[in-house]
Amino acid sequence: MFPPIMLAHGALGPYDEVIFLGVIALFITFMALSWILSRNTKPKFDREPVVDSPSSHQDDSPERFKLD
């Protein structure tokens, strides 16, 4: 007596279950590997961080003020 087919049904019979569970296992493996590798990497930025420096052109008019 064969076990009942629970997850998938198709022309392959019980082998549909094996293929379906194999795809699930492969997906979970790739996701876990991607998560583990990405946790330990530092992002690479295209540009250096902007350093806050006073501009060479400063206007002392009362209408202009420095933003935080």
Image (spheres, rainbow, N blue to C red):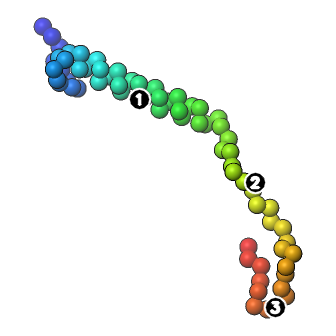
Indicate the amino acid at tag 1: Phe
Indicate which label's residue lies in the foreground, 2 or 1: 2
Taking the view exactly as shown, the residue that stands out farthest to the left is 1
Indicate the amino acid at tag 2: Glu
Q: Earlier in the sequence, mark 1 or mark 3?
A: 1
Query: Which residue is disc 3 drawn over?
Result: 61
Residue 22 in the image: x percent, y percent?
35, 21
Residue 20 in the image: x percent, y percent?
29, 24
Question: Above or below — where is 4 with respect to 53?
Answer: above
Q: Residues within 10 Å of mark 1 (few under 14, many from 20)?
A: few
Question: Above or below — where is 32 with respect to 63?
Answer: above
Taking the view exactly as shown, the residue that stands out farthest to the bottom is 62
Mark 2 to mark 1 CA distance (whole Å): 36 Å
Residue 60 in the image: x percent, y percent?
85, 88
Mark 1 to mark 3 CA distance (whole Å): 62 Å
Q: What SS does tag 1 mark?
A: helix
Q: What SS does tag 3 mark?
A: loop
Q: Is residue 23 left or right of residue 52?
A: left
Q: What SS does tag 2 mark?
A: loop
Q: Is residue 56 left or right of residue 26?
A: right
Camera-side residue of 56 and 15: 56
Q: Residues within 10 Å of mark 2 (few under 14, many from 20)?
A: few
Query: Which residue is disc 1 drawn over?
Result: 27
The residue located at (17%, 24%) in the rendering is: 9
Query: Which residue is disc 2 drawn over?
Result: 48
